Amino acid sequence: MNKGIAIYPGSFDPTTNGHLDLIERGAKIFEELVVAILRNSEKTPMFSVAERLEMLRTLTGHLKNVRIDTFDGLMVEYAVSMEAVCILRGIRAISDYEYELQMALMNRKLEPTLETVFMMPADKYSYVSSRLVREVAQAGGPVKGLVPEVVEQKLREKLDPADKFHDEMHEVPLVVTGGKEKKRKKKA
Ligand code: PNS
C-alpha cells in the first residue's frame, strides 16, 4: 500500500465495469482513493452529478479506503486541496494514450508536485467506455456485463421511465382505460 491520497477524476457518465475494475485496483495500492466526478463538464450528461455520485457510492461501499466526491474547475487545484499525492487514470488501449499523455503533461505543467499514475483495467473491459455504453443503451441494445447491475437498472429507468414505476411498485405498467389511468396489481 502506497502512503497518501490518490484522486481518480472523471465524468463517470455512467460508471462502467472498467471504471470499477480500476477503482478496485487503485484501492489496493493507495492508502486512500478519492473518486472525483467533474461537476461542470461541457458535455450534456445522461446522468446528473447526484445520480452519478449515488451510483458510485453504492458500487464502492465495500471498499473502505475509497471516497466519492465531486469537483469543479481545475482538477490539479482540487487534488492539491485534498492533499493528494497523485492522480490515477486508466489506459485501455493505444487510442487512449495520446489524450492521456497530453492531459498528464498539462497537469504536470500546472502542478509539478502531482504525479499521474496510469493503470490498465482488465483486458475484458478494454473496449468498454461510458460513451459506447450510452450509445448502445440509447439504441436499445444490451449492456449486460459492461456496466454493474445497479447502472444497468438506472439506464433502463432513464431510457424507459415506466421501468422505474414497474420496479418500484411491483405492479405491471399503467393500463389506460377510457382516458383514466389504472394501476393493475401484479398477480403473485
Ligand atoms: O472521464 P473523462 O471525461 O475522460 O475525464 C476527464 C477529466 C474530468 C479528468 C478532465 O476533463 C478534467 O480533469 N477536467 C477538469 C478541468 C481540468 O483540470 N482541465 C485540465 C486537464 S489537462
Image (cartoon, rainbow, N blue to C red):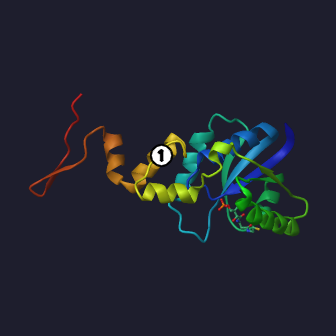
Point out residue 81 in the picture as x, y percentages from the top left corner. 80, 58
Which residue of the protein is positioned furthest toward the top in this rendering? 188
Q: If the picture is divided into quarters, which one holds ligand 1?
A: bottom right
Q: Is residue 61 visible?
A: yes
Count all numbered tags in the image, as a single digit: 1
Query: Where, quadrant-wise, is the N terminus in this rendering?
Result: top right
91 or 156, nearer to the observer: 91
Quarter assignment of residue 179: bottom left
Q: Residue furthest bottom?
A: 42
Q: Residue sitting at 21 percent across and 37 percent down?
A: 185
Tell me where residue 137 appears, x and y as whole percent.
Answer: 45, 54
Residue kind at label 1, given as amino acid type: Glu
Question: Helix, strand or loop at disc 1?
Answer: helix
* Vertical position of residue 145 compared to residue 95: above or below: above
> Where does the C terminus fall, quadrant-wise?
top left
Against 186, is 121 above or below?
below
Q: Is mark 1 within 8 Å of ligand 1?
A: no
* Above or below 130: residue 150: above
